[in-house]
Image: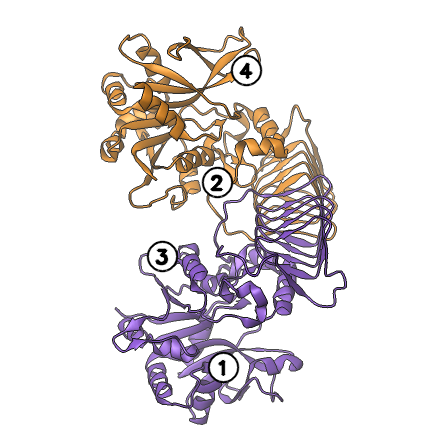
Amino acid sequence: MSKDIVSFILAGGKGTRLSSLTRKRAKPAISFAARYRIIDFPLSNLANSGFDTVSTITQYESIALNSYIGNGEKWGLNGCRSISTVISPRQTEEGASWFFGTADAIYQNIDYLEKLNPDNVLILSGDHIYRMSYNDMLNFHKKRRADLTICSIEVAIDEASRFGIINADKTGRVIGFEEKPKEPKSRLASMGIYIFKFDFLKRVLIEDHANLTSTHDFGKDIIPHLIQNNSRVYTYRYDGYWRDVGTLKSLHDANLDIIDSMHEFSKSDDDLVRHIYTEDTHSLPAYIGKNAIVDHSLINQGAIILGTVRDSVISNEVLIEKGAFVDRCIIMNDVTIEEGARIYDAIVAPHTIIKAHSVINESRSQIILYTDKDGDDYE
Amino acid sequence: MIMNNILALCNLHTAPEIEQFKNARSFPVIPFLGRYVFLDFTLSNFSNSDIDKMGILVRHNPQNINMHLGGNQVWNKNTKTGFLYMLYDERGILNEKYNTDISNLKLNSWVLKRAKIDYVIVASCHYLIRFDYRNIIAFHKERGNDVTMLYKESELGKELPHIDILNADDNGRVKNIYHNDLRKKKVKVDIESYVFSFPFLMNILKHEGQGISFKDAIKLALKQKDVKVECYPFDGSVQAIFDFKDYYHTSLALLSYKQRRKLFSSNWTIYTRTHDTPPSRLGEMSEVKNSFISNGSYIDGHVDSSILARNVTIEKDAKVEKSLIFSEAIIESGAIVRNAVVEHGVRIKANSVLEGSFEHPLYIDKSN
């Protein structure tokens, strides 16, 4: 068996800055845009790109994510020549070990990759919101005869120190790379999307594994090392919408952004980005009540709105009772907001009940996460 | 636990033909409440009753149904041991006289042999009900019946011209079945869900000729003393759809939470095909009241007491009232649509006015 390209989605991280949202689920399993989970975006991108061999690497609180991904059916990745696997740390002849970093997670699965023996390996992060066909990037990678191609995007200079920053020449050859620099030299940020030549990747990972000072991370260790060694590292520029939703604020912002942009895509003629596939909750269509007011919001099926909703994102099976007021909020699935309650600038965790007439975050001094328990269940 | 000794068939041979939809779609795939079709309710009743061997007796337009079923793994619990077959008789489709449910099943009797079953359920999809078939199966077994017929007790016997009525003795034994003559107020309505014991069904298929229906066969069986046909009461709510007006009125009535709860329940999922459409966007200028909004809709205008299907666009200053808007339709800015049913993909031009009445709703397809 030999595959042209095999894809990995790194979905093992906790997402510590998302507070109790990630207590019982990994970040890629978090709800987004009223209907989706974050990981629907990379998985749908892969499906739309026609990439048929996908492994999702999980580690932190993996039950919710593993059962959600299943056999890949939700994204059509259960077809006859497709292979969809979920890979978690395992016990082997050499013993048992956690994944100690993004590069280590791939290193520990080199045996699996050898069996598939692909020409190239695509490595993605499971927690970014964007729509993209990976075909153009792969063509670029082949044309440049690159050992590694890193997908990059221009970011605002004041945000640049949050990312891996790339310095490239006119042909796209990367001549400098700094992970989270204090004083960024360029605005070109790595999106954490890599295409490696498989043989090259294998050699690099084995070397990195033997290096006792390495933290086994692509951004921190592998890429700076490769540039030092003058390997053929190129960057492919992406100029669409892309968000890293690592904090409550960025998760809130990205959700509000999508109220308007979601439909631009779904009306697009470009089949490669038109659909984001996801689970169907088998809900009734949304019901908007006789006295409800809904102003500039995204409403998913299964929601029942009897109160007022403004600039918000409302997921399935959410009930907003009469007299309740929701302003600039992201309401995740199965939340009830009881009569007369008011809530501002918040993300409300799944299955939360907001008691009648309570007032939450009226000062709006920052975006808050509201939950009525320490963390919700596996759903 | 899955009941593997039961085969459930959705019978489309007895479904009414709705004049307005005749060219566009057959009854089982008429859109309902924005995201469903009628067929979904019957199949979901089977599925929720833990029945996993299913078939659809198709009378005509198999391509319509095929499209809706897609990969058809939505209704099955176990996709290996369970199945959902489309059964139809191509010769019957060419010759309407012989296009009956029994002729169909005769031709497709392989499914009965393959399925290894003790009971067969035959159910219609134009009586919308939420029903657990495990109850009628238990009754059927306990009574040792050959046939058990589901009925609904109704006080509206004088107002329902389309129905058949069961006449049963005090022990529930069915004496005869007749078409409603509108003479009696209190009647037992035959809601066309039957349970057959397997040997009895095989006997019918063996001995009855082409061109008769299950109901004809039951009527004939009532004349034989050794055949036991009993009826079983349905105590839930029934929505019967026979014509365009029924369809329109039933749809709008379900906007009421009280009515809706009779058909939907959180422990009785209605399964249907998903289209992966994004959530709906309601814009700054939109005003939506008392309406169902399916996913993918983009609303900047006014919507009142209406049902919008998938990917509908309502532009600024457009007004939609007491209407059913099918998928992909576009109501342009300033247009007014009242008491109407707007077909799939229809574009209503800006500032036009299309108005029916509650008693005579307007049907708008691409031809007008």
Q: Secondary structure at mark 2?
A: loop
Residue that numbered label 4 is attached to: B160
In percent of width and height, residue B193 lies at: 41, 24
Q: Which chain is orange?
A: B
Residue mark closest to the camera, 3 vs 2: 2
Residue that numbered label 2 is attached to: B269
Q: Is residue A178 above or below residue B247?
A: below
Residue that numbered label 1 is attached to: A235
Q: Are marks 2 and 1 in contact (CB under 8 Å)?
A: no
Q: Are marks 2 and 4 in contact (CB under 8 Å)?
A: no
Tell me the quarter of the image containing the C terminus of chain B.
top right
In percent of width and height, residue B309 lies at: 58, 42
Q: Nearer the viewer, residue B82 or A20?
A: A20
| Observer able to see residue B196 | yes
Does A166 sit left or right of A252 as displayed? left
Residue mark closest to the camera, 4 vs 1: 4
Q: Secondary structure at mark 1?
A: strand
Q: Which chain is purple?
A: A
Q: Residues within 10 Å of mark 1 (few under 14, many from 20)?
A: many
Instruction: Find residue A78 and name its label.
Output: 3
Residue under the image location 35 percent in, 12 percent down: B219
- Real-space Cα distance between discs 1 and 3? 32 Å
User: Residue at the top extreme?
Assistant: B183
